[in-house]
Amino acid sequence: MNAYQNIVSVASLIGDPSRAKMLDALMGGQALPAGELAYIAGVSPQTASAHLSKLVNGKLLMVESQGRHRYYRLANAEVAQFVEMLEALSPARPVRSLRQSEELIKVRHARTCYDHLAGRLGVALTNAWLERSYLSILSDREFDVTDEGAEHFLSWGVDLRTSSPGRRVFAKRCLDWSERYHHVGGYLGARVASAALANGWVERVEGTRALRVTERGRDSLRDMYGMDWQP
């Protein structure tokens, strides 16, 4: 009897190109309707429905019903982390159009990785925090926040003294697939990303997981870290 976990079932779900496109589209952390996921995957609504049912049954997605509409999102942060790791290990996708090239540039520049900041922006912030000793490396899986860091994150509107990560890793070292360096994930990453959106420092690019750094955000990056962030 084999006592190990059955990784084949999960691998087969992700291994289908249409389902992989759906999972990637949901890495922005938002819930999307079945029709939009069908369009992204390039399949009919009926085929998309079958794919989505398999992903829900495989516990990779969760579904929410609002009236006649059904919205799908990643089941949890662990699924997002798994997909991000696979993307980091995978070869680059061939770019076949100007639109794909432009979208790839935006996604590499700044994006959400489920519920935290990724791309050049996420990695640049992580490096700035390490250089200023706001973060330290606790292990190969996790960062730690110093006392100076806890004070600094108050300027983002993130008070770490009165909050609890629950079951989530506090400050996950998440390998960024485009930069090949770590950015901050976990509970801290989610709080920072939420604060960046609430402060108007970044805004979502519709139809993609890319983020746009606003003029207010560029001013804040320059004031706090001396970054000359280009739009």
Image (cartoon, rainbow, N blue to C red):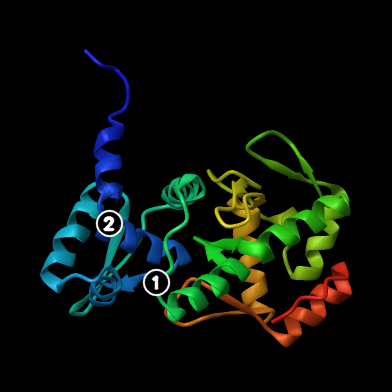
Residue at point 66% right, 40% down? 142
Picture coordinates of residue 196, whole percent (x, y): 67, 73
Label 1: how many residues lie within 10 Å, few (<14), some (14-19) or many (20+)?
few
| Position above or below: 46 against 124 | below
Would you say 202 lies left or right of 127 here? left
The answer to which quarter of the image holds residue 107 is bottom right
SS state under label 2: helix
Label 1, label 2: how far apart the Cα atoms are? 17 Å
State which quarter of the image contains the C terminus: bottom right
Q: Amino acid at mark 1?
A: Arg
Q: Which residue is identified by label 1?
A: 96
Front-lying residue, 160 or 136: 136
Would you say 119 lies left or right of 32 here? right
Residue ranking furthest to the top: 1
Quarter occupied by the N terminus: top left
The residue under label 2 is which amino acid type? Pro
**Decide: marks 1, 2 in contact (CB < 8 A)?**
no
Q: Which residue is pictured at 86% across the width and 67% down the height?
A: 225
- Say which mark, if any, is on residue 17: 2
Seen at 28% across and 47% down, the residue is 15
The quarter of the picture where residue 126 lies is: bottom right
> Is residue 140 shown left or right of residue 73?
right
Mark in the foreground, 1 or 2: 1
Residue 109: percent from the left, percent from the top?
A: 62, 70
Residue sitting at the far left: 46
